[in-house]
Image (cartoon, helix red, strand yellow):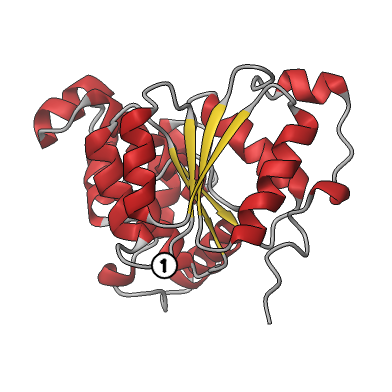
Amino acid sequence: MYNPTKEICPRAANYSSAEALRLKIAGVMKLLIVDDHEILREGVKALLLQIAPGSVVLQAGSCAQALAIIELNRDLDIVLLDLALPGMHGMKAIGVFGKLRPDLPIVVLSASEDPQTIKLALAQGAMGYIPKASSPKTLVSALQFVLEGNVYVPPLLFDETAALLTANRRGNGPRKDDSLLTERQIEVVKLIEIGLSNKAISRKLGLSEKTVKVHVTAIFKTLNVANRTQAVSVARQGKLI
């Protein structure tokens, strides 16, 4: 049986003050944890307060509670969201929270390590996905990465990328509807292929430039590449476009 405090617990991490400063949250970050397991919420809260004593960590056991907290706390910096929640499912909540606060990063913290679930959460607008089996250091690093404006994708998705691309190069890869990228991301890659900028892509697809940036970052992470040229090259090799 999965134990939510087996790896993500305050005693497992030993962070220096320099690391706490590097995290950019000491005395600054205000975070909301949305999970129906109190022991998990308390464990994450204790970890964050250990490395950044000035942080403010709020808790909610359901999406309904979370919505009320988000509305009352306009200065929230980030939300950690479980998917398996009573009432509204976490996957739907990503979109609901996003409409209420488009500027608020939502990071999924879930027991599921299913690649399709990860890709769906990112496609819904999550700025990161952290498996609950991750180490405390991974949790902290992922939060830092998202707070810097990036999209955090867990390494396990990279493993699937390599396997799928290898299979595709052998001519026996997945069907198009099982693609590693979402349909929207494939549209974005095709427009990158013809040289369009994020601004031009946003106009073409009727999206905000911020949303296009999120898709591009997710594409880079999913394909394990560093730039647009590499993204197009890998997508071609993997028969994704």
Local crowd size for mark 1, using a 10 Å CA cut-off: few (<14), some (14–19), many (≥20): some
In the picture as drawn, the residue positioned furthest to the bottom comes out as 1
* Quadrant (top left/top right/bottom left/bottom right) for the N terminus: bottom right
* Camera sees residue 172: yes
Q: Residue at (39%, 61%) from the top-left corner?
A: 180
Picture coordinates of residue 237 (x, y %)? 43, 55
Query: Image check: 190 left or right of 12?
Result: left
Residue 132: percent from left, percent from top: 63, 60
Residue 41 lies, with reference to residue 115, above or below; the image says above
- Residue at the spot x=85%, y=44% of the render? 13
Q: Position of residue 218 (x, y in %)?
A: 42, 42
Left or right: 129 in relation to 54: left
Which residue sits at x=41%, y=74%?
173
In the rendering, at what x and y percent does residue 134 appear?
70, 56
Does residue 186 sit above or below 22 in this rendering? below
Residue designated by label 1: 116
Element marked by disc 1: helix
Instruction: Tell me, yes or no, if residue 189 can be seen here.
Output: no
Return the residue nearer the eye: 228 or 73: 73
Amino acid carrying label 1: it is Gln
Instruction: Compare residues 217 and 130 and report the one nearer the observer.
Output: 130
Q: Quadrant of the C terminus?
A: bottom left
Residue drawn 87% across the image and 49% down it: 11
For this rendering, which residue is in front, 186 or 63? 63
Quadrant of residue 156 within the rendered picture: bottom right
Figure check: 68 above or below 26: below
Q: How many marks?
A: 1
